[in-house]
Amino acid sequence: MTAAPPPSAEPGRKEQERDLLHEVADAVGALMEFWGFKRVMGRVWTLLYLRGEALSASELCDQLSISSGAASMALSELEHWAVVRRIRKPGDRREYFEAETDIWKMISRVLRERELAQIERAVEVFERVREKLRTLPAPGERSRLDDIADRLGKLVDLARVGRGLLVALVQQGRVDLGPLVRFPRSRR
Amino acid sequence: MTAAPPPSAEPGRKEQERDLLHEVADAVGALMEFWGFKRVMGRVWTLLYLRGEALSASELCDQLSISSGAASMALSELEHWAVVRRIRKPGDRREYFEAETDIWKMISRVLRERELAQIERAVEVFERVREKLRTLPAPGERSRLDDIADRLGKLVDLARVGRGLLVALVQQGRVDLGPLVRFPRSRR
DNA sequence: TTGAACTTTCAAAACTTTCTGAAACCTCTA
DNA sequence: TAGAGGTTTCAGAAAGTTTTGAAAGTTCAA
């Protein structure tokens, strides 16, 4: 009387489970999105992690309701960041995917490859512009332009401090933001 | 022979200066975008910082080629994050804006208000789902669901560790990611 | 070598975010 | 307290991002 398989509407245990995992996956997705990744990447990783076993691409598509294209892209990107491992099972043509669980490896890699590059790019722009500002002919308003160049110099210093802290963090897993906390307040 | 005002095409010192500042502003904009802010916010702050004086909204619109609407929105948001100060000059109806230069104040505020909230939200979801998973009737596959709940528990722990580190960072300006580096690798 | 099974690519569609500019709304000064 | 000068709001436009799904590309067992 109570053991009949659910007719067709009604939650159903399987669906409930899927929805719950879905919810967690979304929460992680939001977190990762904040870190500059795509939301699906977080969702995929989470499902793989929670399920605890290697899943095939098509199962991921089913479980997360995404297209094969989206899955393929998310998976390669996750693999690039070493957040997911690609696995082959002998005698099975499909590829399987497994969640990487070494959190620090993931985070430090992002800091090193992405954030550092970002800061470096900014430093380059700052320095180049400062040089150009110097050579800009400025009859009669030398001091105003010089002031700007000075502040730009401070920006360069700041970016360098930031870069240093980031490097320290990645290398030692530990950082003291003192230099940043104390960074020269401008004297007006 | 060489001192005539530039005819109409040609760089022109004024334009060159504006373009150079523009370039720096864009670089900072890209950096801030990465941190989850809007690009214009970074551009506005940078221009204010480099110019070193309080500017009116309309001057910002001119210099950055943005509409009054965009400026208004960026400025209120910057003000919310205490990255820019709003200033009134006596006898002038306009509002002026000035760049805040205390970098740490800005960063710690973002970490506290935004990142922390984000993590807290995730923790709540994780715990709620874990509870529900526990009460999910699971005839005949008790162990699989339990495994999932266990891993979800680890996720909760991880998020708590992250929250702790963040709080420490904000309060002491210093952090040791050891707990994260060492976070329990899953035994498969 | 073939072809079935699976994966990747990519142009177009769907969706999201950001920007514009005019109208509504303030807020001072006279 | 009228209204000129400024600021904010907001609906629609523009720009940007993500997703889809079908076609092209791979790979492997036979």
Image: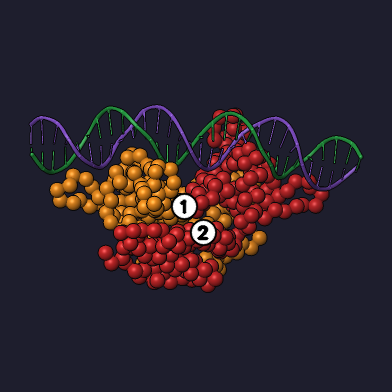
Chain colours: A red, B orange, C green, D purple
Front residue of this view, candidates A32 and B154 = A32
Answer with the quarter of the image where residue A7 lies. Answer: top right
User: How far across and down, in percent of the image, does residue A36 sit?
Assistant: 51, 51
Quarter of the rendering occupied by the N terminus of chain A? top right
> What residue is at 72 percent from the left and 53 percent from the top?
A87
Q: Nearer the viewer, residue A129 or B104?
A: A129
- Which residue corresponds to mark 1? B30
- Which part of the image, by quadrant, shows the C terminus of chain A? bottom left
Place residue A136 in its image quadrant. bottom left
Q: Position of residue B33 (x, y in %)?
A: 45, 51
**Between B100 and D10, the one nearer to me in the picture:** B100
Chain for numbered disc 2: A
The residue identified by callout 2 is A121
At 52% from the left and 48% from the top, the residue drawn is A29
Q: Closer to the camera, B185 or B111? A: B111
Chain holding disc 1: B
Q: Is residue A13 visible?
A: no
| Amino acid type at image mark 1 | Ala
Residue A18 visible:
yes
Report helix, strand or loop for mark 1. Answer: helix
Query: Residue at horizontal 43%, vertical 64%?
Result: A156
Q: Position of residue A163 (x, y in %)?
A: 48, 66
Question: Label 1 neighbourhood size at 10 Å, few (<14), some (14-19), many (20+)?
Answer: many
Q: Residue D25 vs residue B22: left or right?
A: right
